[in-house]
Image: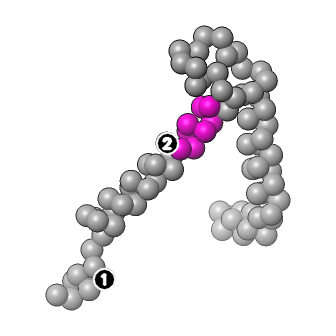
Amino acid sequence: MIVEIINKLRERLPLLARVGLGVLILLLLWDIFLLDKGPAYTAAERFPGFWSIFGLAAASLLIVVAKTIGQVGLQADEDYYDK
């Protein structure tokens, strides 16, 4: 059942990409026009889309750090068990 769902989603990949981009644009517009920017603690929080950009940067940094840790210390060589 899950394989069928995944295959159907793969067939409609361009549509899914457009829908995802549309949702992101709607969220950004909601952040810019509908959220109250009054009780901001810093000037950066008044910038439209600040938390969206902050979240993207934080997630990207976490991915880079995790990949680096994995490559440096956690991954074993392919012939680890042959030695």
| 79 horizontally vs 3: left or right | left
- Residue at position x 49%, y 42% from top? 58
Secondary structure beneath dot 2 equals: helix
| 50 horizontally vs 42: left or right | right
- Residue at position x 67%, y 16% from top? 37
- Whether residue 8 is visible: no
Q: Residue 68: image x %, image y %?
A: 36, 60
Q: What residue is disc 2 on?
A: 58
- Looking at the image, the residue that sits furthest to the left is 83
- Whether residue 64 is visible: yes
Q: Residue 19: image x %, image y %?
A: 80, 51
Q: Nearer the viewer, mark 2 or mark 1?
A: 2
| 41 horizontally vs 24: left or right | left
Q: Is residue 44 magenta?
A: no
**Figure check: 80 above or below 23:** below
Viewport quadrant of the C terminus: bottom left
Which of the two residues, 26 or 11, is positioned nearer the viewer here?
A: 26
Label 2, label 1: how far apart the Cα atoms are: 32 Å
Magenta residues (range): 50-58
Q: Quadrant of residue 48?
A: top right
Q: Which mark is residue 78?
A: 1
Q: Earlier in the sequence, mark 2 or mark 1?
A: 2
Secondary structure beneath dot 1 equals: loop
Q: Main secondary structure of the magenta part?
A: helix
> How packed is label 2: few (under 14 Cα within 10 Å), some, or many (20 or more)?
few
Q: Amino acid at mark 2?
A: Ala
Q: Residue 38: image x %, image y %?
A: 66, 11
Q: Quadrant of residue 34?
A: top right
- Looking at the image, the residue that sits furthest to the bottom is 82
Viewport quadrant of the N terminus: bottom right
**Figure check: 17 above or below 22:** below
